[in-house]
Amino acid sequence: MSDLVFDANRLLTVKNLYVKYKSYWYIYHVLNDISINVGLGEKIGIIGESGAGKTTLLKSILQVLPINGKITSGEIFYRDVNLLKCSKQILLEIRRKRVGMIFQDPLAALNPVFTIKDHLLEVLRYANETANIDKSDLINIALDLLRDTLIPDPERILNSYPFQLSGGMRQRIVIAMALASARELLLADEPTTNLDVTIQAQILKLIGELVEKRGLSMILISHALGLIRKMTERVYVMYGGNIIEEAPTFKLFNEPLHPYTQLLFKTAPKILEPLSSVELRGNPLDYRNLPNGCVFHPRCPYGDSEVCRKVKPHQVKVEKDRTVYCHIYGS
Amino acid sequence: MKEPYEMKRCDKTILKVEHLKKYFNTQKGTVRAVDDISFNVFKGETLAIVGESGSGKTTTANVILGRYTATEGSVFYKSIEIGSISLTMRPIWLRREIQVVFQDPATSLNPKKTVKDIIETAIKIHYPQLNKYERIEKMLELLGYVGLTEDHLFKLPGELGGGERQLVALARALATNPTLLILDEPTSSLDVSAQSRILVTLLNIQKNKDLTYILITHDLAVVKNISHRINVMYLGKIVETATTYEIFTKALHPYTQMLLSSIPTISEEESKILPKRVEPRGEVPSAINPPSGCRFSSRCPFAIDICTKREPLLEEVITDHFVACHLVNKNV
């Protein structure tokens, strides 16, 4: 890793990122001008509905976009390395040894014809490429990983196939695989969506503890608001491939500023309050031709003014650590 | 919190499940998916069945729907035994009266058929006397109920958002004028913003048409908002039955407390009202060899000797509050 020059406080910076998907007829503008940054040891959350571009953002960081997806402009810095311009070798090294990703569906992330051992050893082999470790040592590391993720009877699990395990167990395996290569940054893409509430609580606790123990930074994607509140320090809210609000978690949950975030919080089913009948008006976004001006204006309760329809909102710093992209706060 | 729901004893019991058992024979042994459960559903109420996957919620619903027949025990719908009649043998009026909305609208709607085709099929089968124009009229009325418009008629499910698709599935279920609607995880595959729209629609329809709902879910925030009574199931058994208010204010069974304490809350006030004393741990054991005695004993932090030896019975602890737990029942 001698080619990497380290910068002290910032781990990942995404700057003005644009991503497009191409289908046979159309071009889908999925990410538009996304800028985020992740500090060392910081836990970031990204909220948004499905189709807001959350997963695409994570995939573009690792550059594992589907074949029809393309990063058209922007910069992604991992420490000081520009991931979009660096050599293939460095990119592979970052993927194999520094960043790990937990995918959404654990059954789809594991290959049904290979055992858990095969899965873990493959990741570990690349993660410890230069260290000159033989196979029995790798198996020991794999067992340690499984113990870390609180899997009972790891020796037996190591020789079983994914379909023989329960959903919670599979998700633990996927976490173990991600941790094998994540020495600095963990990307978690809705890690608990398919699980029961009790299992979800256990998995989240586990991820939280492991991230803390290993001093990792984390980006957690979810549309479950309660989960983001519990796990993260700072939150980005995404809508239509744009970041529309950024704030420390507790401030956002106390007082959301952007009209979209406010609606999102209002519509979430709560335990204490009765259901609100507020709903988003209008249709879901069409990524082929996004609305002019603010992307949210066709569905925004305050979005009828001239400026919302024509001008794309700029970044407004409301407080020192809070920004919102909305014309309401501009003047 | 909301006003407690007063159980109206005088209300007509619409569905009565008595000692229902459903076993499946597999190569590894008999899976006791539902093992001796009894409960009543009153007309006009929403009964929620909550529990983790593998606790037998969906199996119970499937027996009521007739997709499985009961191994033992009976299901009475308006005092007619229906648990032993399979779906194909059921009379058409019965099929009309019990309808279902499934979890994932993306798979329960045919992607090649328009909304019109999807809803029209149900009307054609159950009301063959209607002509083309009357059918269209009925369809528009149905779409109106669920808050969709005629613009949606000629769209394919793929062109609709997740929430709208679920509304179409709901309109299809309402096409037969059911009295009992089974909702199998109606919101769990939807976004937060779409969830509340479905729930509000469900509440309004229930008010207008006096429908009875059986809501199957593991999302307790949803349950809190729309159901009147809750059955908590664990490994094929009902472990606690009470009104929603009671469950959320004084849950007695350790499993219910575990479920409640694992809800991710979105504000400080919410976390305060939930019990925090039971940390979730372990997973649902296999239903082939359930733990002896109380089935929850393997995960229960308060388990004592008797728990692994004798099975607790569902007993009334407070009025209308039934619990199956040695620790609670002993104290009474």
Image: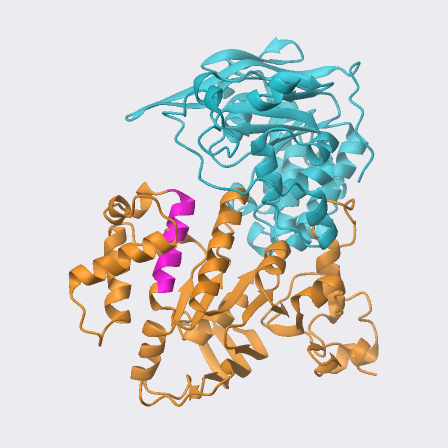
Chain colours: A orange, B cyan
The image shows residue A262, relative to residue B203, as above or below, that is: below
For the magenta stretch, what is the residue range? A166-179
Asked where in the image residue A278 lies, by quadrant, the reply is bottom right
Q: Residue at x 55, y 34 (%)?
A: B51
Using the image as rendered, state which of residue B139 and residue B231 is in the foreground.
Answer: B231
Residue A253, percent from left and from top: 71, 62
What residue lies at 16% left-to-right and 59% top-to-bottom? A136
* Camera-nearest residue between B145 and A303: A303
B38 vs B70, left or right, is: right
What predominant SS class does the magenta segment belong to?
Answer: helix
* Residue B186 forms part of the magenta stretch: no
Q: Position of residue B131 (x, y in %)?
A: 69, 31
**Residue B250, placed above or below residue B237:** below
Q: Position of residue B136 (x, y in %)?
A: 71, 39
Question: Where does residue A45 sit, x and y in percent of width and height?
Answer: 58, 66
Q: Quadrant of the C terminus of chain A?
A: bottom right
Q: Is residue A169 magenta?
A: yes
Specify whether residue B185 is in view: no
Q: Is residue B159 above or below residue A324?
A: above
Frontmost residue, B27 versus A116: A116
Q: What residue is drawn where x is 45% and y is 14%?
A: B71
- The answer to which image quadrant residue B291 occupies is top left
